């Protein structure tokens, strides 16, 4: 069984101990042993990044661009292998895994271009004879803390802009899925980037994540994960004056109006509620349906859900793989019980499935007759569980959609231009979809939410420079 080490200052460094990386489709399948680092390794990684920073920050942008392009090219060339690894360690289907690896490759190539386009401004001063230049400089050494649900795309979409804009990186991936992050680090280690510019320290959040957040040598933290951890990280960062960016939970609404195309509304609801096992921050978990279409919608959803094949993530024909871990499965099943106890009707699914391999399988669940005040409609479940809320009309649908502490993505299924236009303007979400699933975003445009979903500048696209650079204003007397 291969040991996978941490990458610090260009060297592979053994962990204090090693943890097995288990396949959630088949617990008998162990992908390998992955290093558990400690606070001393975080210190060493930050020291290496600090030493590498001056040359990287002021060096050739062509060299940065070439390295990012090379990383993207290798990921794309190996997308099937990496996608298979991803499916094996996280449990999304192989097709979804290959799609995610492809996204990661495109992200590196996108930022290979972006680093050449980083622009400033020159303005006349209000005082005669003086010029003003506004430029962007890297922030410094950044800590990137990533979750388990997108094990290659989320590391990619934090690493690529960080490096493109001249920062040095310490990546701490989710303990549950270190395999893709390690494979990415291995590719980056051969890209021509100098030692210390990129470092990988695997291990527990409470050890490695905590040490990174509290480290005086870290200038900024970019985090994706749960709301509780995100908020505690933000507090620590504010105390020590670090820049911070958080992508956290969602309770994304999918509105379906009477005038919607029923087949399309059902398909996009199934896609965004249940695909990737519902483990996407952009998944729809509240299906808000006007009363004229409600009965037909419930029946059509049940019929469509009966065709979903839950199975081994690597098997041909699987639509939905397992839940990622025992604790996530326990959480999902607990919410099924909570929904029943609250009086919602379990219209389909929700049971633990025993298949031919020992994995964390459950049938996607749909609650009907649910109320917006129920816990299943207020708290992020992060599994293949959705509930339908019946509303009178568009106005009630919009108010219900916005009645949440989160605001990541929101969707509407309608053939009315009037309602679509109004929803785009009045939804309190950072990303709005018309006749499209709430999950399914492009890699080259901003990603992020409002209210409790996100904090700090947007990720992705050219907007990523807001977080990974700092602005300097320079005055010159001619
Ligand atoms: N919005 C999203 O994309 C995601 C949301 N979640 C939500 O979070 C719940 C728990 O999942 P977890 O993997 O446990 O998420 P988490 O928020 O605990 O972990 C996310 C990352 O933060 C690290 N971390 C944990 N504690 C830390 C600390 N004290 N200081 C610094 N870093 C720390 C973890 O090791 C991981 O790398 C899920 O059930 C789901 O509801 C989880 C993953 C992604
Ligand atoms: O990498 C994060 C990520 C990638 C994709 C999506 S979506 O499924 O396309 O919405 C969400 C987050």
Image (spheres, rainbow, N blue to C red):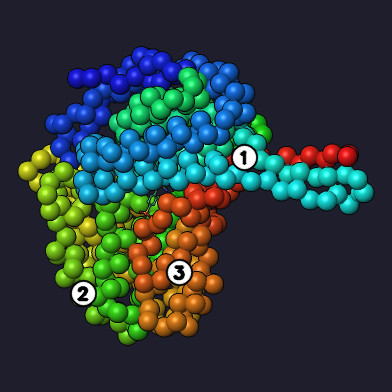
| Residue 245 percent across, percent down from the top left | 55, 43
**137 versus 256 height, above or below:** above
Q: Quadrant of the N terminus?
A: top left
Q: Circle 2 sits on which residue? A: 300
Label 1 SS: strand
Q: Nearer the viewer, residue 288 or 139?
A: 139
| Residue 168 percent across, percent down from the top left | 54, 28
The label shown at residue 469 is 1
89 vs 428, left or right, is left
Q: Circle 3 sits on which residue? A: 401
Q: Closer to the N terminus: mark 3 or mark 1? A: 3
Q: Closer to the N terminus: mark 2 or mark 1? A: 2
Q: Residue at x 28, y 73 (%)?
A: 264
Task: Please tell me in which quadrant of the rendered image residue 184 appears.
Answer: top left
425 vs 239, left or right, is left
Q: Residue at x 34, y 83 (%)?
A: 258
Judge whether residue 227 can be spotted in this image: no
Mark 3 nearby-residue class (10 Å; few <14, some 14–19, many ≥20): many
Q: Measure how far apart labels 2 and 3 are at the Cα level.
A: 22 Å
């Amino acid at each position: 069984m291969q040991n996978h080490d941490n990458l610090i200052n260009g060297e592979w460094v053994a962990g204090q101990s090693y943890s097995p990386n288990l396949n959630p489709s088949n617990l008998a399948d162990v992908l390998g042993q992955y290093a558990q680092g400690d606070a001393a390794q975080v210190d060493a990684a930050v020291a290496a990044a600090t030493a590498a920073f001056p040359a990287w920050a002021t060096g050739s942008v062509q060299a940065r661009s070439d390295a990012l392009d090379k990383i993207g090219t290798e990921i794309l060339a190996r997308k099937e292998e990496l996608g298979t690894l991803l499916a094996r360690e996280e449990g999304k289907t192989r097709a979804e895994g290959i799609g995610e690896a492809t996204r990661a490759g495109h992200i590196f190539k996108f930022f290979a271009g972006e680093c050449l386009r980083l622009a400033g401004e020159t303005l006349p001063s209000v005082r005669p004879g003086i010029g003003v230049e506004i430029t962007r400089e890297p922030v410094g050494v950044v800590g990137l803390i990533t979750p388990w649900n997108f094990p290659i795309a989320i590391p990619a979409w934090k690493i690529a802009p960080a490096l493109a804009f001249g920062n040095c990186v310490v990546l701490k991936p989710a303990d549950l899925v270190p395999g893709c992050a390690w494979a990415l680090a291995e590719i980056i280690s051969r890209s021509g980037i100098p030692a210390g510019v990129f470092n990988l320290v695997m291990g527990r959040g409470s050890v490695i994540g905590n040490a990174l957040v509290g480290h005086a040598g870290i200038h900024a933290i970019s985090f994706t994960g749960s709301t509780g951890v995100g908020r505690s990280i933000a507090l620590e960062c504010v105390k020590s004056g670090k820049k911070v960016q958080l992508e956290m939970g969602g309770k994304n609404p999918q509105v379906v109006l009477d005038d919607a195309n029923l087949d399309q509304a059902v398909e996009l609801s199934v896609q965004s509620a249940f695909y990737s096992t519902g483990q996407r921050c952009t998944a729809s978990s509240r299906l808000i349906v006007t009363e004229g279409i409600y009965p037909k919608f419930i029946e059509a959803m049940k019929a469509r859900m009966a065709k979903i094949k839950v199975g081994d993530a690597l098997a041909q024909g699987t639509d939905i793989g397992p839940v990622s871990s025992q604790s996530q499965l326990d959480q999902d099943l607990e919410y099924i019980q909570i929904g029943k106890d609250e009086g919602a009707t379990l219209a389909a699914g929700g049971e633990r499935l025993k298949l031919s391999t020992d994995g964390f399988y459950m049938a996607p669940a749909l609650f009907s007759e649910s109320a917006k005040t129920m816990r299943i409609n207020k708290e992020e479940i992060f599994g293949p569980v959705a509930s339908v809320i019946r509303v009178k009309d568009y106005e009630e649908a919009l108010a219900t959609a916005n009645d949440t502490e989160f605001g990541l993505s929101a969707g509407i299924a309608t053939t009315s231009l009037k309602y679509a236009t109004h929803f785009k303007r009045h939804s309190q979400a950072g990303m709005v979809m018309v006749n499209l699933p709430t999950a399914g975003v492009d890699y080259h445009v901003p990603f992020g939410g409002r209210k409790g979903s996100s904090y700090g500048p947007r990720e992705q696209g050219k907007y990523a420079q807001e977080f990974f650079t700092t602005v300097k204003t320079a005055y010159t007397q001619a």
